[in-house]
Structures are given as C-alpha cells and as structure tokens.
C-alpha cells in the first residue's frame, strides 16, 4: 500500500478540500505519484468518473475529489470517493456507493448502514493506493462528533481501521479556534487521540505573529505540534466550491458588464456550473437567496441543477421567483436552465412513481414547451457534444433522472453522441439542457457571451484552475512544514 496522511477538521467547511488539493499538487510537484481519497462525502455537487468495464459507463463522486484528482494530474476514479450522500430532504439522502446508486436513506437509517459501507470504503481504499507513492485523505465533518463515533466511516473510524495518521485542521476565520482544537483533544477517546500527529491553522488574516500566544496555548492544552498557520489564500476563490454552505456567504461583487442571477434552490446541485462565468472579468454572478427577488438589472438568469426538481419548483414559486422570471423575460432577458433547471422551465414535471417524494406532479414555469417525466434509471456519463446554435464543441457530463419531450425539443441546444439534447424557445432567449459543464467550453462561452453583448469572453478556464492550484500549492509550501507532513505519512 501507498503511504497515507489524513486531514480532519475541527468542524465542517474549515478548508480541508482546498488544503488536500494544494497538498496533492505540492506532492505532485515533488515528483510523487499521489492520489486523493475521501471515504464519505455529502454533497449535491457531483462529478462523473469513468468505471472500468464499459466505454460509456460512469459513476458519481464528489466534485472535491474530481478537483483533487486534477491537482494530482490523474483521471478521477469512483474509488476516490466510495460513499457519496446526495441530500434530497432535510432528513434523507440518496446514497451512492462506488459511483452507483445504492438506495435512499433517512439520517437515522443511514447510521445503521455504515457497517456495510465500511467494506466498500476499504475495498476502494486498497484500489486507490495501488501504484501510488502517497494518498492524501480528506475527512468529513469533524472527529469531535463523538455521538456518531461507533459507526463512523468518514473520520477516526476510517483512520483507526486503515492506520492513517491525522493532521487536524482548525479554521481561525470562524472564531474560537483555540477552543475547537483543544476541545477536540479533550473529548476524543485515547484510541483516536493518538492518531493525531499535529494540527494546522487555516484562513488566517493579518500578522501571524499575533497568534504566537495562541499556538502556545494550544500546545499547552494538547501537546500536539503545529505544522503551520496558513493565511487566507486568494487563489482558493478561483477553485470550484463543493458545499452549498459557501453560497450563504457569496455576495455580489463590483458591477460588471453582465449580471447573471442564480436562484439558490434548496436542493441546488452542481452549482459549480457557474464557475467559468464567475471567472470572466466582465461577468458578475449573483446567487440570490430565498426571500430576495431576482435582480431586475440581470441580463441572464441561470436556473441550476436540483436534487429535488418538484420540491425546488414549488419553493421557486413560494419565493415569487416565477413572477420575477416572467418580468425578466418581458424585459428581453435571457434564461438558461441546466438539468433540474431545464425541467422546471417546461410546462409540467411528473413523477408518477414518487421517485423524488410524495408530490408527484407540479406545473412548470412555462418558458419552454416541453414536459418531463421522472424515470428510475439515472443517466450518469461524461460526454463530448456540440452546441447547435453556435456549432462549437462542448465538454461536460450528465447526471439526471427523467425524460423531457415536447415541441421545443425540435430546436435542440446540443448534440450529444449523435442525439439531440435540450430545447430552445422560438425567440432563442430561453435555453434548456441536461449538459452540466456547459459553460466550461471556452469557445462556446465566448460566443454565448458575445450573443449577450459581451465582447472578449472565453478565457482559458481550465488553465485558470491549474494556475490557482499551483498558487495554493506554493502558499502551502511557504506556510506549512510540508516536509514534516509528508514524512509522517505511513
């Protein structure tokens, strides 16, 4: 087996994903054959990884592990994230195991499943380590959730079973970082505590020397070594975000030539579809929270994917966004619906088998003359396609349930593997598609923005991500004792 080191956080959203990606890139820059691994992830931002055994076979993993695979310079594998939970309600989620749908489970029922899922985690763990020099593991949530420890597969349950040393990550930007690190030390059982080889502090702003006494206090309480204090890395903002919790902190930036409004659906999925637009210097992407109207000065509204199309469609109306959208159309505004957003743009969405829940039918927004029927079989695949209106290549992936038909599909938005996809309104201003990653194609994005009156779009987005990963890696090499972290891998 390859050597391994694991990053666990004192809480959720402390920056583990970016730190693992940066360490993966730093290890790769040192000439190491490195891989990422996350035993269990919870996110509706999924990527498609190919599965052995078929040209078109694909499985779902968290977007974080997709990004970390890019940092390693390797193709993503379903084994990099063997268990993916995709929340559908406040208390239930779809369970993906090694890329495929395993079933659905309420939170309490899922705890009972974990014993069986550990077998899949350890199987994937062995596969990821084959041929690698180093595996960098990302935990989920916090090991301090000791009420869940007995069946844990994401943090110390995995670390102790696989014998992987742990670096604890504290987020100083959230406040209370001394208490969170010392408190974790206090409440962990001895078996778990001895897995921790040290800690690091993340997202520091200002003069690091001002925290010297804080580091001494943590050492006094815990005896753990500090691997360094990482400043707020600006390059991290140019990387795809995984968790929808970040949307709560996104605010409108400076006014730019085009404002893109994105309603924050309750079960928003794959919102990183918007990242290439956010990277364009003339484009301002505004995520609109529930209770706030869609901005009247938006030139484009993008309705993103959803893990619960009917549920989010009903909430869309409750927020009054349907009225805002109609007003936007009357002003001549453009609309793009992706995946679940495409389904919402039609006349009706039907779910006769109750796949998404108890509500089996809902009127759509009526901006496209199509209708959708949910079907049990999920389409999961990476694809190459071509834009119909611009005759330009597209790359991306599909993750969706449902079949959409209707008169407007006679004007498809793309050709995928020889088949027509999506629909366009008669005036060309409303576009629906099942293609995630639509805006990731630089030439298409440039022409699309040009059609909205924006000149000079179409930056090399993938190159921007690569540069951001390199910058994060340099930042970590500068502020962390990476030699010590890598040397402690076993």
Image (cartoon, helix red, strand yellow):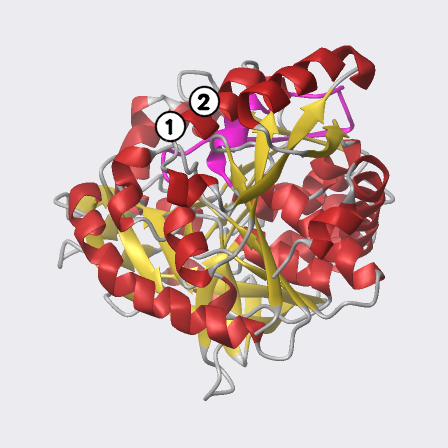
Can residue 12 be seen from the camera position used here?
yes
How far, Cα to Cα, is label 1 from label 2?
A: 6 Å
Residue at image point 54% right, 79% down = 417
Contact between labelled residues 2 and 1, with CB atoms less than 8 Å apart = yes
Q: Work out which quarter of the rendered image holds the C terminus and state it.
A: bottom right
Q: Is residue 194 left or right of residue 390?
A: left
Can residue 402 be seen from the camera position used here?
no
Residue 176 vs residue 63, the one in the foreground: 176
Relative to 37, is 127 above or below?
A: below
- Highlighted range, magenta: 243-267
Q: Which residue is mark 1?
A: 187
In the rendered picture of this protein, how many numbered marks are placed on residues? Answer: 2
- Is-magenta flag for residue 259? yes
Residue 428 locus on image (x, y percent)? 58, 50
Secondary structure found at label 1: helix
Q: Quadrant of residue 384?
A: bottom right
Q: Which residue is mark 2?
A: 183
Secondary structure found at label 2: helix
Q: Work out which quarter of the rendered image holds the N terminus and state it.
A: bottom right
Residue at image point 64% right, 79% down = 131
Q: Residues within 10 Å of mark 1 (few under 14, many from 20)?
A: some
Residue 275 locus on image (x, y percent)? 66, 43
């Amino acid at each position: 087996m390859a050597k391994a080191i694991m990053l666990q956080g004192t809480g959720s959203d402390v920056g583990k994903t970016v730190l693992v990606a940066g360490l993966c890139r730093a290890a790769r820059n040192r000439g190491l054959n490195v891989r990422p691994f996350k035993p269990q992830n919870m996110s509706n931002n999924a990527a498609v990884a190919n599965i052995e055994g078929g040209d078109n076979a694909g499985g779902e993993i968290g977007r974080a592990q997709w990004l970390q695979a890019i940092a390693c310079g390797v193709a993503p594998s379903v084994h990099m994230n063997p268990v993916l939970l995709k929340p559908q309600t406040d208390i239930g989620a779809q369970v993906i195991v090694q890329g495929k749908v395993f079933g659905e489970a309420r939170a309490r029922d899922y705890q009972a499943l974990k014993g069986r899922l550990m077998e899949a985690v350890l199987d994937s763990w062995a596969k990821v380590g084959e041929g690698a020099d180093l595996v960098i593991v990302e935990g989920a949530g916090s090991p301090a959730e000791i009420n869940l420890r007995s069946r844990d597969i994401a943090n110390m349950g995995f670390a102790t079973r696989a014998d992987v040393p742990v670096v604890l990550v504290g987020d100083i930007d959230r406040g209370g970082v001394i208490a969170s690190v010392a408190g974790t030390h206090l409440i962990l059982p001895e078996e778990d505590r001895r897995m921790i080889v040290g800690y690091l502090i993340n997202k520091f702003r200002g003069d690091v020397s001002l925290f010297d006494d804080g580091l001494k206090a943590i050492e006094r309480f815990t005896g753990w070594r500090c691997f360094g204090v990482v400043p707020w890395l600006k390059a991290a903002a140019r990387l795809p975000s995984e968790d929808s919790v970040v949307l709560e902190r996104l605010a409108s930036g400076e006014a730019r030539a085009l404002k893109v409004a994105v309603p924050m659906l309750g079960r928003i999925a794959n919102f990183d579809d918007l990242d290439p637009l956010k990277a364009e210097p003339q484009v301002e992407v505004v995520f609109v929270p529930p209770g706030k109207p869609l901005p009247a000065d938006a030139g484009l509204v993008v309705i993103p994917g959803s893990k619960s199309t009917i549920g989010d469609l009903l909430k869309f109306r409750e927020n009054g966004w349907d009225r805002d959208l109609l007003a936007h159309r009357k002003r001549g505004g453009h609309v793009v619906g992706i995946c679940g957003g495409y389904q919402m743009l039609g006349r009706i969405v039907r779910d006769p088998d109750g796949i998404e829940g108890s509500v089996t039918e809902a009127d759509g927004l009526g901006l496209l003359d199509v209708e959708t029927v949910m079907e049990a079989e999920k389409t999961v695949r990476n694809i190459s396609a071509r834009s119909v209106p611009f005759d330009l290549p597209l790359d991306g992936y599909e993750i969706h349930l449902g079949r959409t038909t209707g008169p407007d599909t006679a004007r498809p938005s793309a050709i995928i593997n020889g088949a027509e996809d999506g629909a366009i309104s008669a005036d060309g201003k409303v576009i629906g598609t099942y293609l995630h990653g639509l805006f990731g194609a630089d030439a298409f994005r440039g022409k699309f923005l040009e059609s909205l009156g924006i000149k000079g779009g179409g930056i090399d987005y993938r190159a921007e991500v690569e540069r951001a990963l390199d910058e994060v890696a340099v930042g970590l090499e500068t502020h962390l004792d990476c030699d010590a972290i890598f040397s402690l891998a076993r």
